[in-house]
Image (spheres, rainbow, N blue to C red):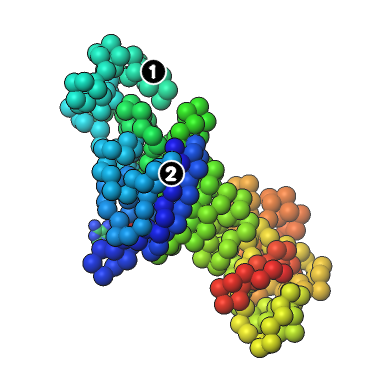
Amino acid sequence: MSIEICGISKSYGSFTALRDVQLEIPTGQLVALLGPSGSGKTTLLRLIAGLEPADSGQVFFNGEDHTHRDVRERGVGFVFQHYALFRQMDIFDNIAFGLTVRPRKQRPTKAEIKERVHSLLRLVQLEGLAHRYPSQLSGGQRQRVALARALAVEPKFLLLDEPFGALDAKVRQELRRWLRRLHEKLGLTIVFVTHDQEEALELADRVVVMNEGRVEQTGSPQEVYNNPSNPFVYSFLGRVNFFRGRIADGKVKLGEAEFAVDWAVEDDDVPAVGYVRPHDVDVSRSPQYPQSVAAELIYVYNLGSVVRLELRRLDTGEIFEAEVSRRRFAELSLQSGDLLYVHLKHVAFYVGGHLIHA
Ligand SMILES: Nc1ncnc2c1ncn2[C@@H]1O[C@H](COP(=O)(O)OP(=O)(O)OP(=O)(O)O)[C@@H](O)[C@H]1O
């Protein structure tokens, strides 16, 4: 089932939660709505579900206008962060709930319900736990029950609001992999909300980056990470350094470093900002390139597979980060206070918030 959001806006009093949101979710994709707190992710999910009316705009499922259909008619499965399982019911009854409350004519027989619940228990790998109560399960297991319960009614698609938000890092990691496999198996359209960029990049086929009620960029994880369309997306997805500079004579000057750019505008000498990921900062003991700049190593953070260096540029005084492999770190035998030369390998330059290519 594909989902199409056309020009949706939503305000609460004078506060605008969604501004003219345009979004297409193709059938069978696993899509992440990613953004900081308050960016409108949950509001958008609730609008898709039909839990909230939009002020303007339309929602289409498979090309059919569902804007004025209520939540039951939309046939959506949800899972929220706080898995609200029924405490007094065992796991079997929790999963069966959506089927047992159907009107008699649409309700499957007892045998059919039993069959479906057991196949869902197999799917979420909780066979054998049908007669436990929610309090007897771990957080990750409860979340899988919540997913099974949402799937029991054979929804057209699944909407998950921070489904793993309340769980610890290791369980989140396991559940992410599990959700990815489940998605591959079922081929169901799934939209999930997260404010965790790693979760979005790792799990989703497509990432929708939101900020202040707007969609800033939509694309595959590689697209949004490697080609952020604006400074917000750049800074939100992954760690990034930014250096203030100016652009003049077809060159961006970031302190003593100069970069040739394709910039043909009459009014010269305008402010520009260069964004560089820490892993795109090359560190050495001597200047290797004409644009290398001198920096002092302030602090070393050992992160496991990589080492993060906090540095201060000698020309501008700006503090920034570089990431080097453990091997490179050992080769250079680095210590705080060392004088180093850095080369910025990939810099994205923005002038007035617009990307210009280096
Ligand atoms: N019922 C409501 N009444 C008033 N304001 C609301 C209501 N629901 C949401 N908002 C506001 O709309 C904005 C967007 O909220 P939303 O829950 O969609 O954000 P979010 O991106 O999901 O954030 P989080 O990651 O914190 O859940 C927030 O500033 C929120 O305070």
Closest to the observer, 87 or 31: 31
Kindly identify the residue that appears in the image at 36 percent across and 46 percent down: 65
Residue bearing mark 2:
63
Image disc number at residue 119: 1
Kindly identify the residue that appears in the image at 65 percent across and 67 percent down: 348
Kindly identify the residue that appears in the image at 45 percent across and 57 percent down: 22
Q: Position of residue 125 (x, y in %)?
A: 42, 22
Q: Amino acid at mark 2?
A: Gly
Q: Position of residue 63 (x, y in %)?
A: 43, 44
Kindly identify the residue that appears in the image at 81 percent across and 70 percent down: 289
Q: Residues within 10 Å of mark 2 (few under 14, many from 20)?
A: few
**Left or right: 283, with 4 as reference point:** right
Q: Is residue 262 visible?
A: yes
Image disc number at residue 171: none
Closest to the observer, 150 or 292: 150
Q: Amino acid at mark 1?
A: Ser
Closest to the observer, 245 or 115: 115
Q: Position of residue 269 (x, y in %)?
A: 66, 87
